[in-house]
Amino acid sequence: MRKIFLVLGVILGVIVAVGIYMFIQFSRPATVDVPVAIGPIPAGTVLKPFLFRIVHMSNVDKDTLSQWVTAADWANVADGKSTTSDIRSGFPVARAQIDPNSSGAVETRLSNAITGTNDYYVVVPVKPDEVGAYIQPFDRIDLIVSLGSASLSALTLPPTMTTAAGDVVNADLNVTQTIPLPISKLIMQDMTIIRIDRAAPSASNSAARAADPANATGDVQRLYLRVTRDQLEVLSFVLNNGRHNYAIRAATGSQETPPSDGVTWDDFVRWFYAQRGNNAKGAAPFDTISPSRPK
């Protein structure tokens, strides 16, 4: 009888021990291996394992984890893909930061990023003050050209113009046209940046960067722009004549490229006199300058 109770006691003890073990296992937070950046990773970088270290994380809710790249899905989601925005040191990679259509081949041959048969990329040297520090690959920019100065009276155009085939355009134009200088014109719109070259971060960078080394990035040096064949000559003219400025479009903004009127010296003078007297209800610059204002 004692043996039976002893056996039952042992069995009951085993059951209790197993139950306690299973309770501990099920109540223990699930641990997930997550790659985090060893150092700051600039946008446009092709993601490779050596740029990251593995961190064991627990108590991460499923909704948050589903937005990150984990070690388990690294090979299928991130390896060899390009990042579309900067990754800060010590942070995981968000799935939204990865270009799913990128190929590791663009690391050594950027032309692989050009898929259109009529597309090219052009390397444009820039200065930090022209585009700032926050521009990213896949941003879209517009280009403005300014020609002449107030010391030059006018830009003279011929009375007639001909096409390459010899056809006369504006044949009824019998007077010479002049455009008062200087002039500014929005000349190229919605160009996509496919890569950015930056200088290496240095100790001489701004105090803000020195205070936040995990987010330090070098100054922008070059932009790689995707352009069409028709845009090449215009872009070359703008880069080699006059002065130009860049305007960065909203990331979610329109891709439309409506024509613009440009601004001449006479336009500025009209606006200048319209604003004199500090009349709050006077003509706004756009109303005064642009004759093609949408009705």
Image: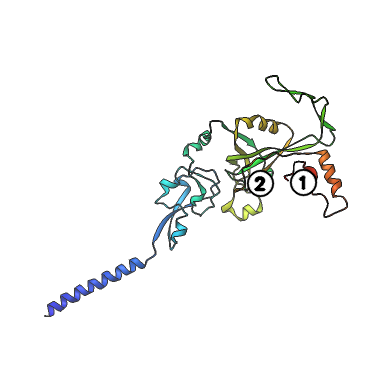
Residue situated in front as seen by the camera: 201 or 101: 101
Q: Which residue lies most toward the bottom here?
A: 1
Q: Residue at x 23, y 74 (%)?
A: 13
Of the numbered discs in the image, which one, if any, rests on residue 132? 2
Residue under numbered circle 1: 286
**Secondary element at tag 2:** loop
Q: State which mark lies toward you, 2 or 1.
A: 1
- Splitting the image into 4 quarters, where does residue 208 fall? bottom right
Q: Are marks 2 and 1 in contact (CB under 8 Å)?
A: no
Which mark, by number, is residue 265? none
Q: Position of residue 89 (x, y in %)?
A: 53, 53
At a point 80% along the width and 45% down the height, the residue shown is: 288
Sort mark 1 into few (<14), some (14-19) or many (20+) by Cα contacts within 10 Å.
few
Which residue type does callout 2 highlight?
A: Gly
Q: Nearer the viewer, residue 96 or 136?
A: 96
Measuring from the top left, give residue 174's x and y in whole percent: 82, 24
Residue 55 locus on image (x, y percent)? 44, 56
- In the rendered view, tell whether residue 152 sits above or below residue 202: above
Q: Considering depth in this image, is 93 or 37 the residue closer to the camera?
A: 93
